[in-house]
Amino acid sequence: MKRMANFVVIGHVDHGKSTLMGRLLCDMKVVDQRSLEKLRKEAGNIGKSSFALAWVMDQTREERSRGVTVDVATNHFETERTRFTILDAPGHRDFIPNMIAGASQADFAVLVIDASTNSFESGLKGQTKEHALLVRSMGVQRIVVAVNKMDTVSWSEERFKDISLQMSTFLTTTSFQAKNITFIPLAGLTGENVTKKVTDPKAKWYTGQTLVEALDTSEIAKRDVKKPLRLTINDVFRGGITNPVSISGRIQAGSVQIGDIILAMPSNETAAIKAIEVENEPVDWAVAGQIPTLHLADIDPVHLRSGDVACDPKNPIKLIKTFTSKILAFEHVLPMSVEVFRGRLQAEGKLKKLVATLNKTSGEIMKNKPRIVKPGEVARVVVELDRELPLEPGTRVVLREGGNTIAAGLLEAN
Amino acid sequence: MRLLKSQIDQKHGSGFATFLPEEPEDMWHAYNLIQPTDLIRAKALRRVQKTSDSGSVSSERVKIDLTIAVTSTDFDIGSGQLHVAGRVAVENEYVKLGGHHTLDLELNRRFTLEKVDGWDSVALEMLKEACDTQRKAELWAVVMGEGIANICLITEHQTILRQRVEVAVPRKRRGGIDGHDKGMEKFFWTTLSTLLRQMDLSSAAASTQPEKTVPLLIASPGFVATSFLAYIKAEATRTTNKPLLALLPTILVAHSSSPHVHSLAEVLASSVITTKLSDTKYARETALMDKFNTYIRLDDGRAWYGPREVERAVEKGAVGRGGGVLLISNALFRANDVVERKRWVGLVDRVRDVEGGEVRVLSSLHESGQRLEALGNVAAILTFPLEDLDEEDDEEEEVAEAPVVEEEDMII
Ligand SMILES: Nc1nc2c(ncn2[C@@H]2O[C@H](COP(=O)(O)OP(=O)(O)O)[C@@H](O)[C@H]2O)c(=O)[nH]1
C-alpha cells in the first residue's frame, strides 16, 4: 500500500495559506485548468482576482465574501511515493477551535509565513506562534516552514536566513527537535519552489528541496493499527439518498471494515458500517492514520455528534468527568473555568486544583499546591468537566479561556 | 422587593422585617436573606380533616398563619422557587409546636423574617440591596456558535441560563449534498423560536412591569451573531411579528471568544456593552475580578486567594486602608452552618470597620462570582506584599512519581 500522510496548514491570517494550497492542488493536477479559469473569472467579477487560487480551498459562500477561511477544508493529492490529505485550517483567532480539530488529525504541519517586510514580524506577534504551539501540543512533531511570498522580497537570501533563524529558535524552545524542522523559501502565487524549482536568477543561492519534495521525505507518525478502534468524529452528515447517516474523522487507533459494529460514545449506541470511503473512493477497510467517511446503518443521527468517539464495542472508551493532566502553561493558570478541546470536541469545565509544578524534563515535583502556574511552566492539575466525556490517559487536550490558549495538556492515568 | 415594615434595633440588630416579593429576582434576595435558625412567618394553606357530628370525614383547605424556625432552604434558580423547611415555632389550632413544615415562598405573598441572633452587618447590607427600588438593568443574552446557543437572562444579581439550544450542523463539504446551509437555517429558526418563548414566559412572570422591552445581546465568535441578526431581521419583515419588530432596535451584537456562558463576562465588560448599560453590578464585579487577576499575575505577593490565606492576610493587617480589597462571594453567607457564616461576617466586619479596607460581596450567580468560586469564594488585594501565606499547607504530600522515560526532551 502507498504511504499515506495528513498534514495541517497553519499560519497567520493573510500569510497565503489558501493561495499556496490552491497552487499545490492545481500543479498536482487535482484541480483542472477549467475549474481554475472559472474561479478566476468569478474572483475577477468582484475585483479580487488574486483570490482565485485561495478559492480552490475556501468552500462556503460566507468565506468567499469575507475572504477568510473558517472551517477545516480537506483536499487530497498524490506523488509517486505518498497519498496526501491537506487539512487547511483557519488562521483567524476566532476559529482556532477548528484549527485544533485540524491539528488533531495531522501527521505533520506546514507553517506558512509571509516573508514580506513587517508581515513576518506582525505574524509573530499574532497567530504564528500560537499556531505552532498548538500543533506541537496536539502531538505533531514534524514541521515544514513555508517561507512564503519570497517574490516580494526579491528572493533575498538574507531575509530567508533571518526568518529561519528566528523561527528555529522559537520552535526548538517549544520542543520541536531541530532535525524535524525544515525551511523552504517559496511563492504560492507564482508557484516557485512549490512543485517546481524556482528559476528566478535572484534565487540561485537556494539549491534545496521544493515544498512537495520536503513533504514527500517527511517521516510520518507511528500508526497504532493493532490497538482497539478509536475514531474521533469530525463531522456527521447525510452522505446521500442511500446513506442517510455518515460520519468522518481520523482513525487514531485500530481499523474498520465493512460490516463492523462500532460503538459511539458518549451516547453508548451501536451502529453497523455499511460502506467506507477514503478520499471519496469506496474501499473495504481503513486503518489508523486515515480519515475515512463511514456510511452507517442501524443508528439514529441524534446519537452522533462531532467530537464523539467511535470505538470498538468490545474495548469501549470510558466516560470520565474528572481527570488529572500534565500541562504546559502558555498563560498564567489559576483555578478557573476553562474550555477543554480534544479534536472536534469542545467542552466546558473547571480547573479545580493546581496539584504541583513539575520539572520540565524529569517530571519531578518542584512545588506542591502552587498558587499560580506561570507561562512556560509545567504542572499537574485536576480538571472537572461539566459533563462526562470520552477521554483516556495519553490523550492530548488544549485548555482555553476567554479566547486565549492557556495550556496544552496530556491526560494521566487517574 | 418591597419592605412593608421593619423594626430592627440599630444597635443590637434584633427585630424583624416584613417583605413583599414582587419580581422574580426578589426570590433570590429572599434566598440570600433567610438563614437557618431564623424565624419566618407567612400564610400557608393547610389541608385539614374534619369529622362532623354524624361521623363523616371531610377535607378542607384553610389559610393559616405559620411561623417556623428555619432548618434549611432550597432555591431553584431556573424557576425562582424558594422552599423553606423548618419546625413550627408558634403553635396554633392546626399545627403542633416542633412539627416539620415547608413554606413555599411566592411572588406577591408577604413574609416576615426575624433573626434570633439579630441582624448582622452582612444581613443588613443585603436587606438594603434587596429593597433598593432603583430601576435595575436587565438584559437577554444569546451566546452562540455554529449549532450551539445559550439563552440567558441577566439581571442585577443573577445570570440565569434559561435554555441551551443544540442543533447538529454538518460541516461544509465539497460537491454532493451540502447540509451546512440548511443546518444553519434550522439552527437559527430553533434558537429564535426558543428565545421568543423564553421572553414571553418571563414578561408574563414579571407582572409589575409587563410593558418594558428588555434589550437583547447577541454574541459569538466569528460571524454567527451577525448572521443570526440578519436572520432575525428577515424573519421580522417576513412575518411582521410585532414583538419581534419591537425587539429589533434593542439588539446589540458583540464578539465573544466562545459560545459558552462564561464568555459573557468578557462581553459584558467590553466597551460595546458598558457604554450602553452603564454601571451595572455585573460590570463592576467583573472589573474587580479582572483587577485581582492582574495583580496575581504580577506574582508580587499582593494578591491572595483561598479562605485560610485571606484570613491570614487580614490578621497581618494587609487588607486595610490604602487599597486593601476583600472579595467575597455571597455563597459563603448562605452557609447552612451558622458558625461558618459568623466566620465570614466577622472577617467582613474586621476589614471594613477595623482595618478600613474595602469589601465587595460578589453574587455567586454571576460569572465573576463563579470565577471567585473557583478560587475558594474569597480573595484579597493587599496593601503590601506578603509571602508564604500558604506555607503551612505544604506538608509533603505522597505523590507517586513514576520515572518519566520518553524520547521527547520535554515531558509534555
Ligand atoms: N506577492 C505574493 N502574494 C501572495 C502570495 N501568496 C499569497 N499572496 C497574497 O496574499 C493574500 C492572502 O492570501 P490567502 O491565501 O487568502 O491567505 P490566507 O488567509 O493565509 O489563506 C492574497 O491577496 C494573495 O494573493 C505570494 O506568494 N506572493
Image: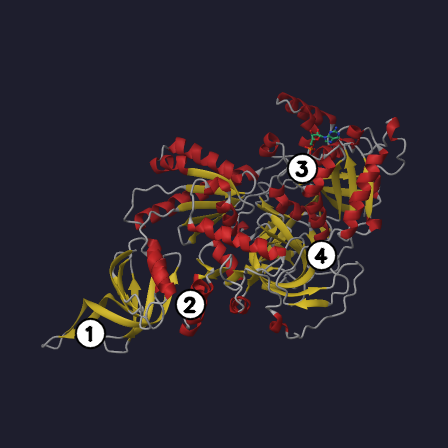
Does the residue at mark 1 contact the one at mark 4 (Cβ under 8 Å)? no
Q: Report the mark closest to the observer, 4 or 3.
A: 3
* Numbered label attached to residue A253: 4
Asked whether A109 or B250 is in front, the reply is B250
* Numbered label attached to residue B74: none
Q: Is residue A120 above or below residue A345?
A: above
Q: Is mark 3 within 8 Å of ligand 1?
A: yes
Residue density around tag 4, few if under 14, some if 14–19, many if 20 or more, within 10 Å = many
Q: Position of residue B195 (x, y in %)?
A: 41, 45
* Numbered label attached to residue A13: 3
Q: Is residue B30 above or below residue B95?
A: above
Measure the alpha-carbon separation of dots 1 and 3.
Answer: 75 Å
Residue density around tag 1, few if under 14, some if 14–19, many if 20 or more, within 10 Å = few
Secondary-structure class at tag 2? helix
Q: Position of residue A313 (x, y in %)?
A: 63, 61
Pointer 2 chain: B
